[in-house]
Amino acid sequence: MAIVQRLRRFMRRKTTNKSKQTTQSSCGLELPASLWISNIFPYLDRNSQNKLCEASRDVYFATKLLNLQQEWPSGTIRIKKIILAASFSPYGNELAFVTSNSKSVKVYSRRHGYEQELRGHKGQCSDVTYAPSGNFLVSCSRVDGTVRLWRKEGFDDQMGSKSKKNHYVNYRILNTKVFGTLHVCVSPNNEDIASYGDDGKIYVSNPKSGKLIAHTSWRSRLFIDCFNCVDFSTERDSTLAHTLNNQNVRLWNYRTQTKVELEDNDATRMVDYAAYVTSLKFVRMSNGDASEPREYLAVGCRVALVKLWDLRDYLCVLKIHLGTGWSSVNELVFNKEGTQMACTGGGSSLRVFSLVPEGGYIGKIENHKDRIKSLAFSPDGKTLASGSSDRTLKLWNVLQVPDIN
């Protein structure tokens, strides 16, 4: 009898504690007290176009309360460290990023918020990106020199660990045997991974076998924080573009070892000696008529200039001058359709351009308090993520850029 009474008292205490740990919101959703944010009231108006989302790295995004539709909310994710790189998953349901002085990759879920921290690197992570297929995630470190591949499914044969439901495991390590890896990208067919090392060389590896396919015999020394100068072609097999000592741009087929260097229309060097190349990106877009989209290469320079190259004719077809106040173009990103471009320089602002016929300058965003380090478009093209040295990751509604300021 005494045992039964003790069990009843225990159950009453458990029920009381459970009710105290739950908070009822005006949206009719119940959130555990540990997930409740004191300044959550701006979220409650679901019709508001200026939702502000603030969350530290160890609490949920509170997305169930803030974002009942199938889109990322506009707002701010406050992180305790500087954002170095960010990437949306191809399906738009996740956002991965790496921060300064951190050995791990953080993954945010659109539905569930802060989902997982991917640990395995032995030093600071420098870059992260999703494969175009969405089957795996790639990260690299500038300290241990490795490129790590993460996936959600199956048994990890190499690492000997079984993945949890919807959680990533590190299933392969690509060791390029360099001191540090600064930048990584995946080919459109998901069959090759290119990484840029501290030694100034580019390494191409196979993600399935983990073997090294090719590497450059030359070295290219880049400026500090100007590592976004390697990208795979969207049309040409086994071809990537890279910069040579920040002065020339070269197309390199790493299987046939053929090289093509781009030159300006007047047969001079692609850029003046003072206008160093600081970023480049392949993009497929239509020229406005009934023809199919074709491939272009966008090149950002240190003199606040963006050049767009038609790679069928090897001609520079467009130049965008960003004006005063910009020292360089360190980051270039395009939406999936190639109709919009966002870029940032060495400051705290970014600009968005429309590349459709009769398009042009859309707007300027000045909301960060320190230098912007990374940009990423969501797959649907509606959201633009910007990571900054002010320890915030901001999500912008691109359709409302002119109204942001």
Image: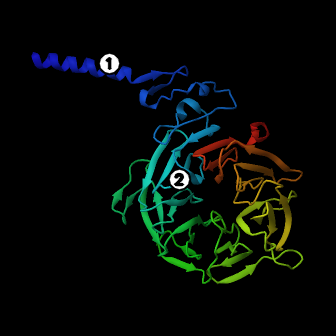
Which quadrant is home to the C terminus?
Answer: top right
- Which label number is shown at residue 389? none
Looking at the picture, does residue 129 appear above or below residue 35? Answer: below
Residue appearing at x 70%, y 44% in the figure:
382
Cβ–Cβ under 8 Å for marks 2 and 1: no
- Residue 271's x, y, as percent? 80, 72
**The one of 131 and 120 positioned closer to us in this rendering:** 120
> Mark 2 or mark 1: which is in front?
2
- Residue 285's x, y, as percent? 78, 59
Apparent side of residue 2 relative to residue 345 in the rendered image (left or right): left
Which of pointers 2 and 1 lies earlier in the amino acid sequence? Answer: 1
Residue wearing tag 2: 99
Give neighbour class at mark 2: few <14, some 14-19, many 20+ (Cα, 10 Å).
many
Apparent side of residue 161 relative to residue 332 in the rendered image (left or right): left
The colour mode here is rainbow
- Which label number is shown at residue 16? 1
Give neighbour class at mark 1: few <14, some 14-19, many 20+ (Cα, 10 Å).
few
Looking at the picture, does residue 198 appear above or below residue 300? Answer: below
- Residue 173's x, y, as percent? 44, 67
Q: Secondary structure at mark 2?
A: strand
Residue 121 seen by the camera: yes
Amino acid type for the residue under numbered disc 1: Thr
Q: CA distance from mark 2 to mark 1?
A: 40 Å
Amino acid type for the residue under numbered disc 2: Thr
- Residue 157's x, y, as percent? 36, 64
Residue appearing at x 50%, y 29% in the figure:
37
The total number of labels drawn is 2
Residue 237 seen by the camera: no
Residue appearing at x 49%, y 75% in the figure:
178
* Residue at the far left in the pictured view: 1
Q: Quadrant of residue 1?
A: top left
Q: Secondary structure at mark 1?
A: helix
